[in-house]
Amino acid sequence: IVPIMRPMNTVIYGRTDDPDGLRRAYLQAVSTICTLGIPAYVGLFLTSDLVARLFLGPEWGQVGHILGIIALSFLPGLFTMPWPSVTVALERPKLVTLATSIEFFVKLPLIWFFVENYGVGGAVWARVCMNIFVALIAFVFIKRLINLSYRQQFDAVIRPIIASAIMTL
């Protein structure tokens, strides 16, 4: 997914003088990322036991559950992956630093608590919680930076979400 961002960054950077164009470029980037990423991560989640057995051997089958949850933990980040590009395009990269600092100071005690009380499984679930938290921060920043409502941000990803939900059936 990350290599896809290079050409999308160029499109986002080229729209700094056109607020509507910047919004469209951001929504197209999010839609493209989610169209490719959501089915991949959901598919990995659904087949994680098989993937673990295939690549690691039959004795590692139980690791598949953890692998599946890790795959799901990447989903929230897909919804806001291009947001750092918008901050750079608008010459506001300090917002990424602020979000990363908030993430660090929340993640550290959260992971410590979950690992201490629930072990490896707790660490994985702490990762899920943190990725959701970081995505929510990015949603707020995008709303404020380029005036995209939460509804508009959600509408850009509803098709891949529905398609992936159907895929799970």
Image: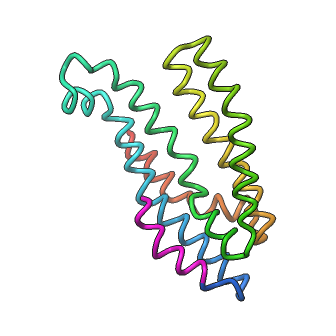
Image spot of residue 6 (x, y percent): 46, 71
Q: Main secondary structure of the magenta part?
A: helix
Give the side of residue 22 with respect to residue 161, left or right.
Answer: right
Q: Residue at x 42, y 25 (%)?
A: 66
Region in magenta: 1-13
Q: Is residue 6 magenta?
A: yes
Q: Quadrant of residue 25?
A: bottom right
Give the side of residue 29 with respect to residue 46, left or right.
Answer: right
Image spot of residue 60 (x, y percent): 26, 20
Q: Is residue 19 above or below residue 2?
A: below
Q: Quadrant of residue 92?
A: bottom right
The quadrant of the rendering that contains the C terminus is top left
Image spot of residue 163 (x, y percent): 44, 53
Q: Is residue 138 above or below residue 64?
A: below
Q: Residue at x 64, y 84 (%)?
A: 15
Q: Residue at x 40, y 65 (%)?
A: 3
Q: Residue at x 25, y 30 (%)?
A: 50
Q: Is residue 152 above or below residue 56?
A: below
Of 120 and 169, the residue lying toward us: 120
Of 132 and 102, the residue lying toward us: 102
Q: Is residue 48 above or below residue 89?
A: above
Q: Is residue 113 magenta?
A: no
The quadrant of the rendering that contains the N terminus is bottom left
Give the side of residue 70 with respect to residue 49, left or right.
Answer: right
